């Protein structure tokens, strides 16, 4: 099936590596202009944009800085024009042992929820607001995980919980407690 995204501008978070990197490549190949978001891996994002050529732009933001995300999205809209689709792909999966001190344990839970839940929610909110103002329907893709409905190992409880916020339960999967 050939999907034609010519004329569409897509923001892919966490596109400096992994799944987001592949998504950005495929969306670009389908004709989209891609905003290649990265956190710390600037070189990888710049290299991807250089490889893709036209219609590819690296954009940086630390997604744990929740109080900056609405403004950041508005800045992207002003810099590039209407953003027709948002792919919330960026995510973190911190491992922390049950035996860890509470401060460390809670700190990693908080960071996990900032990136995997707070940032996703805020970017969806900003995207919807701009899509309505720009007069297009818009598309949002949130990358979930099986961990959201089957649970995860003790070290990854925060990850499983954070992904549960956007996972759709599947009838063939029963929740599994570790
Ligand atoms: N890999 C799997 O097997 C799997 C399975 C199920 C679901 N998923 C989900 O799929 C998505 C992508 O997974 P992946 O394995 O491809 O991830 P990955 O290779 O670990 O890459 C994570 C991406 O998220 C970005 N990121 C992380 N924290 C950030 C922050 N605070 N601010 C800005 N960017 C941040 C990273 O940017 P920088 O590197 O530039 O900092 C990177 O581009 C995630 O949502 C994950 O939960 C993955």
Image: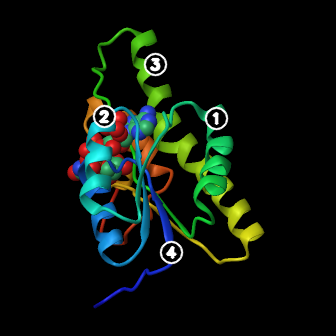
Residue 137 occupies quadrant: bottom right
Q: Which residue is the site of mark 2?
A: 156
Give the number of the disc on residue 8: 4
What residue lies at 32% left-to-right and 45% top-to-bottom? 46
Q: Earlier in the sequence, mark 1 or mark 2?
A: 1
Q: Residues within 10 Å of mark 3 (few under 14, many from 20)?
A: few
Q: Earlier in the sequence, mark 2 or mark 4?
A: 4
Q: Residues within 10 Å of mark 1 (few under 14, many from 20)?
A: some
Viewport quadrant of the N terminus: bottom left
What residue lies at 59% left-to-right and 51% top-to-bottom? 76
Pointers 1 and 3 in contact (C-beta within 8 Å) = no
Alpha carbon distance from label 1 to label 2: 27 Å
Q: Earlier in the sequence, mark 1 or mark 3?
A: 1
Give the number of the disc on residue 68: 1
Counting from the top left corner in percent of width and height, residue 25 is at 28, 64
Q: Earlier in the sequence, mark 2 or mark 3?
A: 3
Alpha carbon distance from label 4 to label 1: 25 Å
Alpha carbon distance from label 1 to label 3: 20 Å
| Residue 66 visible to an observer of this rendering | yes
What residue lies at 40% left-to-right and 46% top-to-bottom? 90
Q: Quadrant of ligand 1?
A: top left
Foreground label between 4 and 1: 4
Viewport quadrant of the C terminus: top left
Q: Is residue 156 above or below residue 107?
A: below
Q: Which residue is the site of mark 3?
A: 107
Q: Secondary structure under badge 1?
A: helix
Does the closest atom of ligand 1 sit within 8 Å of the Cβ of label 1?
Answer: no
Q: Is residue 32 above or below residue 47?
A: below
Alpha carbon distance from label 2 to label 4: 36 Å
Alpha carbon distance from label 2 to label 3: 13 Å
């Amino acid at each position: 099936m050939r999907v034609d995204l010519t004329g569409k501008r897509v923001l892919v978070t966490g596109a400096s590596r992994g799944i987001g990197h592949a998504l950005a490549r495929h969306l670009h190949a389908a004709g989209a202009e891609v905003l290649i978001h990265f956190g710390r891996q600037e070189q990888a994002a710049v290299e991807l944009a250089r490889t893709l050529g036209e219609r590819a732009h690296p954009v940086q933001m630390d997604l744990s800085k929740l109080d900056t995300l609405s403004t950041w999205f508005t800045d992207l809209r002003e810099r590039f024009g209407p953003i027709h689709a948002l792919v919330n792909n960026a995510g973190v999966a911190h491992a922390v042992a049950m035996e860890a001190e509470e401060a460390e344990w809670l700190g990693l839970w908080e960071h996990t929820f900032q990136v995997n839940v707070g940032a996703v929610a805020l970017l969806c909110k900003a995207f919807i607001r701009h899509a309505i103002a720009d007069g297009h329907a818009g598309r949002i893709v949130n990358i979930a995980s099986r961990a959201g409905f089957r649970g995860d190992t003790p070290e990854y409880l925060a990850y499983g919980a954070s992904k549960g916020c956007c996972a759709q339960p599947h009838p063939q999967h029963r929740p599994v407690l570790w």
